[in-house]
Amino acid sequence: MTTLTDDTLPTTPRAMRDEMIAFAVMALLLASVPFTGVYPYFVMQALCFALLACAFNLLIGYGGLLSFGHAMFLGTAGYCSAHALKVWALPPELGILVGIAGAFVLSIITGYISIRRQGIYFSMITLALSQLLYFIYLQAPFTHGEDGIQGIPQGHMFGLFDLSQPTVLYYVILVGFLAGFLLIFRIINSPFGEVLKAIRENEPRAISLGYRTDQYKFLAFVLSGTLAGFAGALKVFVAQNASLTDVHWSMSGEVVLMTLVGGLGTIFGPVVGAFVIIAMQQYLAGFGQWVTVIQGSIFVICVLTFRRGVVGEVAHYFRRSL
Amino acid sequence: MQALYAQLLVGLINGSFYALLSLGLAVIFGMLNIINFAHGALYMMGAFVAYFLLSLGGISYWWALLIAPIIVGIFGMILERTMLQWLTGLDHLYGLLLTFGIALIVQGVFQNYFGSSGLPYAIPDQLRGGMNLGFMFLPVYRGWVVIFSLIVCIATWFLIEKTRLGAYLRAATENPTLVRAFGVNVPRMITLTYGLGVGLAALAGVLSAPINQVRPLMGADLIIVVFAVVVIGGMGSIMGSIITGFALGVIEGLTKYFYPEASNTVVFVLMVLVLLVKPTGLTGRAA
């Protein structure tokens, strides 16, 4: 089996420095958005999806596990947060925590079921589990079926920051995104992350070295699902609703597409991919169903010619790790 | 009681589609090591080809049963030659992603031209009406679907498990290099296998056209249930996927009678239960 990223460079001081510089550039660019003419809601939405894609990438890019049901964490956290904010009238920070907790519990259950199968079977199980949840949410009373939970109050974060102000909301979302991103960055560069990469490259060898690979993969699954839930909880504040589209399997497909376009197994790839795909949907919305065709074509082109993705190709060209 | 029998029949019919589709998936997976995410889209194409044959060419259902799988099968073989064959030796997730992309393209194109609503396809004259079996009324067409797909499933099983061609096929699955050394053209066999699997999907599409109408997304929702069927069955054997397909259809039908709220989820719940007890699926071999 060939590996996902055939030229992963070892983490050297130089690679670390490149990544830190890239991170600083990204943070500065994103922080300056309110001062430019860019529509902040577009960027906020893209940031939520970027965090989701980064969480997803933690699992596939570093664990070699293709989850085709990551929308279930996004959607579940969204419903939990929305319910906590609207029905229980909790403040935003607790609402986010409830969402994260929901995704955490769900990822433990689904991880326990799915992690025991490998390869394509793993993908199919995660897909089927997310579809099971889709039907449950379709019928459960608290999700309001097709209508979703609407009109969610944004409230005051920590009693201080008024989230109904677009600029305040933007910075809260940005801080959430950067915190999630740094956490993933830290996980990847930890000893745990190194073991994950070893499992991705050669699982039998990792087992023979004495690692309980199932436990590592399970932990990666739970981390990835919980972080995806964080993205879902943040998204509630941007969209002010939680609906079935976030749980549907086509959403899982979009997450895969974002990561693939940006670059599987690269740190910044999913962010770039998310921005590309969200921008595409925004500006091509007039083409109706042709957007689906274009997305499908991107899948095909990426797999056939462009397997490293945008960031992966750039990093390969400059012989850097990004 | 009438309603129970009716639901059992619906279950058997759905089971026929599950069996035909998971059978095709199993055949393709065996040779190409690819989970064909485009299977649902190709099933839909089968139904559309039958519709075009009738509305544009006046070609009847009976010919469509033969011609539609051939046309879609050829389309599949072109896909295999132009795209899928470049993935040999790569991580199998790329196969899933590529076929997913193909499915999006095919479904998107059909949605553009035909919207999301259904086109009617009439039941052929010879299969109209119904029979009174004493305990229930059986629409002839539905009985025909069950019997015909059973015959096709068994024929495919016979082809693969009992004939010389099937023996080559199974051997090439185990060790392509060795089989090639014996002078068998393995790449061509892979292409034909993909065509066969796709043809089975298209055949299911033609069979379903008079029952379910012809819709661009008819395969998209079905395919995920079929994936669950495949996970439960384990895709270890051809017979395994046939039996699991029919059995799950029947179980789904029974659920619809006794506890309708769970009818959409019962297959997925069963999948979870089976995986908890036996992670390899019912007839599964290690992945």
Image (tube, helix red, strand yellow):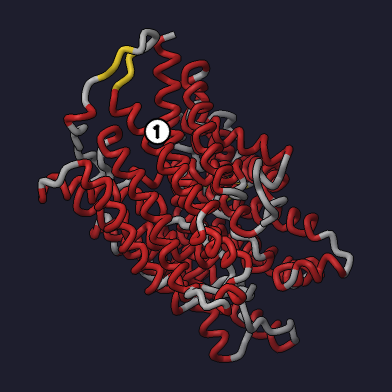
**Residue A292 appears in the figure:** no
Q: Is residue B197 left or right of residue B92?
A: left
Q: Position of residue B214 (x, y in %)?
A: 25, 41
Residue A16 sits above or below residue B188 on the image: below
What residue is shown at x 62% (from left), y 50% (from top)? B236
Image quarter in which the N terminus of chain A is found: bottom right
**Residue A299 appears in the figure:** yes
Residue A10 sits above or below residue A148 on the image: below
Q: Quadrant of residue A10?
A: bottom right
Front in this rendered view, residue A20 or A159 = A20
Element type where label 1 sits in the image: helix
Residue A226 sits above or below residue A322 on the image: above
Q: Position of residue A34 (x, y in %)?
A: 44, 66
Mark 1 falls within which chain? A
What residue is shown at x 55% (from left), y 60% (from top)? B167
Image quarter in which the C terminus of chain A is found: bottom right
What residue is shown at x 47% (from left), y 67% (from top)? B190
Residue B287 sits above or below residue A105 on the image: below
Q: Is residue A43 left or right of residue A321?
A: left
Q: Which residue is mark 1?
A: A147
Q: Position of residue A44 (x, y in %)?
A: 47, 59
**Residue type, label 1:** Asp
Count the labels in the image.
1
Residue extending farthest to the right is: A210
Q: Is residue A160 left or right of residue A36?
A: right
Front in this rendered view, residue A318 or B116 = B116
Q: Quadrant of residue A283?
A: bottom left
Front in this rendered view, residue B21 or A113 = B21
Q: Position of residue A28 (x, y in %)?
A: 54, 75
Q: Quadrant of residue A205?
A: bottom right
